[in-house]
Image (cartoon, grey):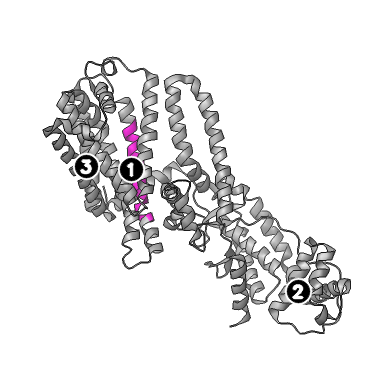
């Protein structure tokens, strides 16, 4: 069949397809998939009969448009993120359990080591931090200071919420992304943060402000610190898939690692949002410390329970 | 090697097209977008983000401390959420749309939410140590111009197809007899392509191109273009 005859025969159908694909609303007309398959068929026919390149290009574009309409993604929906957290998160915890355990152990191990070091040798904190920032931290947790005594205004509560969202989640995402650099971008910030956290806690204990400090950090720390270790483990896994691709090619290994750790970073994101809410609105409240320690115990129990069940059994 | 394969290979060499097999049993070709056009799209998006952030920050700056907090949240959402929100919705951002690009999966299907999240959260690795140096290096070493985020998410950035194309077929020059010269199929295609492109070429350029074949056609200038076009029309089947 000559090309023009072929075009004449099918042109009406192509125009119908084109009109449908441009004016498509949410509900798909029943004839669209049928027309799409016919266009696919036309493209195959045109190729085997060596019709002109512009006809093939036109049909190619039709098929391309058709498949992008038929196979389009679900878009961005809160419900799909929650589904990802509810089901895939636990499976991902299980699949990556060795990374998570190592990251968890490294984070708290180094924090404890730093804590012990600074507890034994109080001057050691000046090796890592300059005097100015130590003074700042001391004034934040000094029971007699204005930061602790005055009721916070609602405005500064929102400000701190913004800081926690911007800073903490930003760090978690940076660690996840930086992890692709052979894990270095994830491991270094993780260890740095754990060391810093341990050293500061010990210093606060040394100067005797522990009641204001621990009552403040205990509740949100459960979600925040665990989320940071999860984000670090997820980033490190991507990097290690490049270092040790095993039986796969590196291109395939990094792709597989990406899809297994995705629920982890989504989970860490949700946990950090929860942590930011607690840190901004609950932790600075002026209530007896007993309440805060009780809430902290509940949160720690819940987070560790999820972490244990997830890494051990893969479901809640 | 059969002609079909040969033609496809020439296309691949010349236009950097990708042939991807669909479950429908046909293959389509995709054209991956290169570093320059993607950088332009990035800059365009960057200016939009900067503008939106500046407007939000200006509006919120009157709210005191609470406004500062909201500005930080807005900065976070714009930095990390802009690409994820737009690409998850339609596979393109305003900048990509401007330069006619879109994100698809390796197999040509529209990218899913998971793909989009991974490719955008890995931007810190591509941006290392500054100005997307590593991303540009990775892109220049792969045929499909993938940055690290694209490798990990399994995505490609391709040129988007135009929804409406110019009409097919050409002039009213007809040809009753078969051409005197026997041509192979890819040569016939070249002649047909000449006819289809001739609408975009000036008369002088058409004649210049046709004159390359003046010996074989036994004609020059206007006669040569006329002869080529009538041959093309014969192959297209203008006279059935």
Residue A38 at x, y = what percent? 63, 67
Q: Nearer the viewer, residue B35 or B190?
A: B35
From the image, state whether disc 3 or disc 2 is nearer to you.
2
Identify the element where label 3 is drawn: helix
> Which residue is disc 3 drawn over?
A304
Q: Which disc number belongs to residue B191?
A: 2
Real-space Cα distance between discs 3 and 2? 72 Å
Q: Is residue B76 left or right of residue A219?
A: right
Q: Nearer the viewer, residue A291 or B1?
A: B1
**Magenta part of the chain:** A258-276
Could you say which quadrant of the image residue A168 lies in? top left
Neighbor class of circle 2 (other Cα within 10 Å; few <14, some 14-19, many 20+) is many
Real-space Cα distance between discs 1 and 3? 14 Å
State whether the magenta stretch is mostly helix, strand or loop: helix
- Are dots 2 and 1 on a single chain? no
Above or below: residue B2 compared with residue B85: below
Neighbor class of circle 3 (other Cα within 10 Å; few <14, some 14-19, many 20+) is some
Query: Quarter holding the N terminus of chain A?
Result: bottom right
Real-space Cα distance between discs 2 and 1? 60 Å
Tell me if residue A35 can be seen. no
Name which residue lies at 22% across and 50% down.
A101
Question: Magenta segment: does it hold B26?
Answer: no
> Which residue is disc 1 drawn over?
A268
Q: Chain of mark 1?
A: A
Q: Chain of mark 2?
A: B
Q: Nearer the viewer, residue B124 or B112?
A: B124
Q: Chain of mark 3?
A: A
């Amino acid at each position: 069949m000559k090309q023009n005859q072929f075009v004449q025969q099918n042109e009406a159908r192509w125009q119908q397809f084109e009109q449908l694909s441009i004016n498509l609303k949410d509900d798909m007309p029943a004839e669209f998939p049928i027309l799409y398959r016919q266009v696919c068929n036309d493209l195959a026919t045109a190729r085997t009969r060596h019709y002109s390149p512009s006809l093939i290009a036109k049909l190619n574009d039709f098929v391309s448009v058709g498949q992008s309409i038929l196979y389009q993604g679900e878009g961005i929906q809160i419900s799909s993120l929650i589904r990802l957290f509810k089901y895939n998160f636990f499976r991902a915890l299980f699949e990556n359990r060795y990374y998570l355990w190592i990251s968890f152990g490294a984070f708290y191990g180094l924090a404890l080591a730093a804590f012990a070091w600074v507890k034994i040798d109080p001057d050691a904190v000046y090796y890592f931090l300059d005097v100015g920032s130590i003074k700042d931290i001391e004034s934040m947790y000094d029971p007699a200071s204005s930061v602790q005594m005055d009721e916070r205004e609602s405005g500064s509560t929102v400000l701190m919420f913004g800081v926690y969202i911007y800073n903490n989640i930003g760090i978690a995402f940076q660690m996840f992304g930086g992890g692709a650099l052979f894990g270095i971008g994830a491991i270094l910030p993780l260890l740095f943060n754990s060391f810093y956290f341990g050293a500061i806690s010990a210093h606060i204990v040394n100067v005797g402000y522990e009641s204001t400090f621990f009552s403040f950090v205990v509740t949100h720390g459960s979600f925040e610190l665990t989320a940071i270790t999860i984000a670090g483990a997820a980033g490190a896994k991507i990097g290690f898939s490049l270092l040790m691709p095993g039986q796969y090619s590196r291109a395939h290994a990094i792709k597989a690692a990406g899809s297994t750790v995705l629920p982890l970073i989504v989970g860490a994101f949700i946990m950090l949002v929860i942590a930011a809410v607690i840190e901004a609105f609950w932790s600075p409240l002026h209530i007896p410390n007993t309440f805060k320690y009780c809430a902290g115990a509940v949160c720690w129990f819940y987070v560790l329970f999820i972490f244990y069940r997830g890494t051990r059994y893969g479901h809640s | 090697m059969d002609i079909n394969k040969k033609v496809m290979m020439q296309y691949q060499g010349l236009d950097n097209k990708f042939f991807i097999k669909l479950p429908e049993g046909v293959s389509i070709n995709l054209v991956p977008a290169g570093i320059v056009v993607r950088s332009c799209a990035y800059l365009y998006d960057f200016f939009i983000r900067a503008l939106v952030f500046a407007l939000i920050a200006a509006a919120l700056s009157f709210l005191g401390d609470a406004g500062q907090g909201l500005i930080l949240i807005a900065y976070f959402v714009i930095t990390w959420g802009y690409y994820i929100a737009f690409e998850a919705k339609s596979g393109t951002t305003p900048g990509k749309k401007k330069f006619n690009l879109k994100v698809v999966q390796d197999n040509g299907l529209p990218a899913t939410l998971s793909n989009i999240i991974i490719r955008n959260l890995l931007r810190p690795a591509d941006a290392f140590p500054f100005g997307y140096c590593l991303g540009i290096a990775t892109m220049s070493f792969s045929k499909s111009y993938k940055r690290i985020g694209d490798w990990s998410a399994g995505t490609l950035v391709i040129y988007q197809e135009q929804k409406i194309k110019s009409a097919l077929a050409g002039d009213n020059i007809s040809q009753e007899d078969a051409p005197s010269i026997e041509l192979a199929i890819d040569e016939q295609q070249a002649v047909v392509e000449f006819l289809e492109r001739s609408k975009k070429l000036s008369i002088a350029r058409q004649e210049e191109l046709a004159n390359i074949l003046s010996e074989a056609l036994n004609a020059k200038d206007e006669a040569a273009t006329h002869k080529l076009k009538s041959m093309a029309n014969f192959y297209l089947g203008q006279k059935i």
